[in-house]
């Protein structure tokens, strides 16, 4: 088996410094209590989203996780997991998970910055935008499963149904 060696590179700036600067410029509500973690609050159409940016040094990746306040009761867990699978088939970037420790659904994505690469403001903006957009797009499907007792397929079909024209 071939050994893979990745060189350590010095960074001129911590990747989260760029996210923090962007958050300040955009007047986002954020908190950076740790060097490698930062949270941003985003008000969406369906919910308030809690977005966490994390720098993962081991793999040189900027990770984003976007959660919304939907606790999944045990009796709906299987149907939510089915919905997560169906939704993930629709996504080109990132994925949804059911975070088992808290029973919450979240969207996750990472930007690899191997070799000392630095994220751009555009990349950081797009990470946040894609996370919030995915949550906004599928939030109601998760609601339908949890509160209306619908199946995963019915719920997904309902949110993917798009009308054309005007009534």
Image: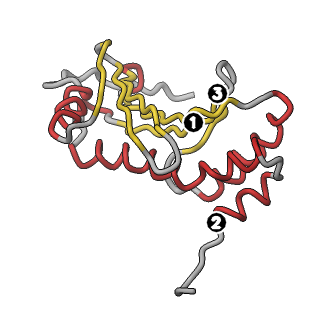
Q: Nearer the viewer, residue 17 or 48?
A: 48
Number of marks present in the image shown: 3
| Label located before the other in sequence (1 or 2) | 1
Q: Residue at x 51, y 38 (%)?
A: 108
Q: Return the residue at label 2.
A: 160
The residue that label 3 is drawn on is: 99
Q: Within the image, what quadrant is residue 32 found in? A: top left
Circle nearer the viewer, 2 or 3: 2
Q: Is residue 160 above or below residue 27?
A: below
Coloring scheme used:
secondary structure
The C terminus: image quadrant: bottom right
Residue depicted at 26% across the width and 27% down the height: 16
Q: Percent from the top left, x then y, of residue 109?
A: 47, 40
Q: Residues within 10 Å of mark 3 (few under 14, many from 20)?
A: some
Of the residues under marks 3 and 1, which one precedes in the sequence? Answer: 3
Q: CA distance from mark 2 to mark 3?
A: 24 Å
In the rendered image of this protein, does residue 64 appear above or below residue 83? above
Mark 2 vs 3, N-terminal side = 3
Asked if the residues shown at circle 3 and circle 1 are in contact, with their CB atoms under 8 angstroms apart, the answer is yes
Can you tell which mark lies on residue 134?
none
Residue bearing mark 1: 106
* Residue 95 locus on image (x, y percent): 57, 44
For the point 37% across and 26% down, the residue is 39
27 left or right, relative to 96: left
Disc 1 to disc 2, how far (Cα)?
19 Å
State the SS at label 2. helix
Q: Are marks 1 and 2 in contact (CB under 8 Å)?
A: no
Q: Residue at x 80, y 34 (%)?
A: 77
Residue 23: percent from left, percent from top: 23, 35
In this picture, residue 117 sits left or right of residue 150 = left
């Amino acid at each position: 088996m071939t050994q893979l060696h990745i060189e350590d590179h010095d960074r001129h700036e911590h990747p989260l410094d760029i996210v923090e600067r962007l958050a300040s410029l955009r007047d986002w509500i954020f908190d950076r209590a740790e060097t490698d973690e930062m949270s941003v609050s985003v008000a969406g159409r369906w919910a308030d989203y809690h977005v966490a940016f994390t720098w993962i040094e081991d793999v040189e990746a900027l990770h984003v996780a976007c959660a919304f306040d939907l606790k999944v009761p045990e009796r709906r867990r299987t149907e939510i997991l089915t919905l997560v699978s169906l939704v993930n088939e629709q996504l080109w970037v990132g994925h949804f998970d059911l975070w088992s420790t808290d029973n919450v659904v979240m969207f996750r994505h990472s930007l690899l910055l191997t070799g000392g690469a630095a994220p751009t403001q555009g990349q950081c903006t797009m990470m946040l935008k894609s996370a919030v957009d995915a949550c906004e797009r599928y939030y109601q499907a998760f609601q339908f499963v949890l509160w209306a007792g619908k199946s995963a397929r019915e719920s997904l079909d309902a949110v993917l149904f798009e009308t054309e024209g005007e009534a």
